[in-house]
Image (tube, rainbow, N blue to C red):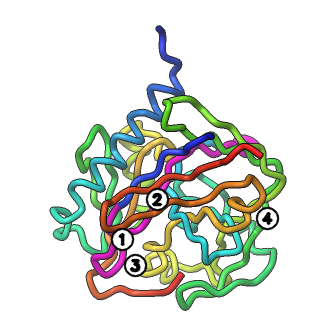
Amino acid sequence: MVKTEFERDVKCFEEDAQWLCANYDTLREYEGKVVVIKNKQIILAAESIEEAVKELKKRGEDAAFLLITSIPPKDLSFIL
Amino acid sequence: MLKIRCHVRKFLRNRFFPFTTFMLKYSRYRGFLEALIDTGSPYTVVSTRDALRLGFPIKRMQSGESVSLAGFRFFNHPIRNVTLIFRTEEEESFSVSIPQMGILVPTKINRSTLNDRRLMAIPSIIGNDFLEDYGFSLYFNPGKKKAFLLQEQE
């Protein structure tokens, strides 16, 4: 069966989210930073989302389709 | 019964929270989101971080209901006719057209707020409105790191 581009992309995104789940504890060095995950690895760590998006654009990547998250500082706490 | 995939990961204070992934389509904007499923939130919203990632012009979106979240003030800027596409446990797509959802736009936008690590830690949220309007219940077992959204047939 031929997979559509959407199915491929969403699967990659889901796999990156699963990778984040499994490896969250190893990402403490990125505390307070914005990290970009692609193909189950950190491809960029930036000080801000603006910086990350700018750098991704330079690299020809589309930020809208990549898993970008921030690793909250350990002491950060809030009730949503 | 329809089951939407979720994943459970650490988020705050080393505690586990339920998240789901989906594609958002709105006007010319589209992209993937990872959202916290928050039954305590009355709203489904795109976070400021994700709004910037998807290229929303947030400086021109400073309108809407004023809301407080995690110590910050936001406009819950409404966007209308949004499509969300989820993945089910059966690896199929499940598309929902929602009449309105929000974008969290800080009431003050400047370099300081956009660089604020606490603000940027706030994720997009699937809120109670979505669960209620589309008949979903959340199964969440943080101890077993298991979560899914279940839509039961009437």
Q: Would you name the residue on which mark 1 appears?
A: B11
- Main secondary structure along the magenta-highlighted residues: strand
Q: Residues within 10 Å of mark 3 (few under 14, many from 20)?
A: many
x 44%, y 26%: residue: A8
x 29%, y 37%: residue: A39
Q: Is residue B113 above or below residue A40?
A: below
4 or 1: mark nearer the eye:
1
Read off the chain for label 4: B
Pointers 4 and 1 in contact (C-beta within 8 Å): no
Place residue B146 in its image quadrant. bottom left
Q: How far across and down, in percent of the image, does residue B97 sit? A: 77, 44
4 or 2: mark nearer the eye:
2
Q: Would you name the residue on which mark 4 appears?
A: B78
Q: How far across and down, in percent of the image, does residue A69 sit? A: 39, 61
Q: Which residues are magenta?
A: B9-29
Pointers 2 and 3 in contact (C-beta within 8 Å): no
Q: CA distance from mark 4 to mark 2?
A: 22 Å
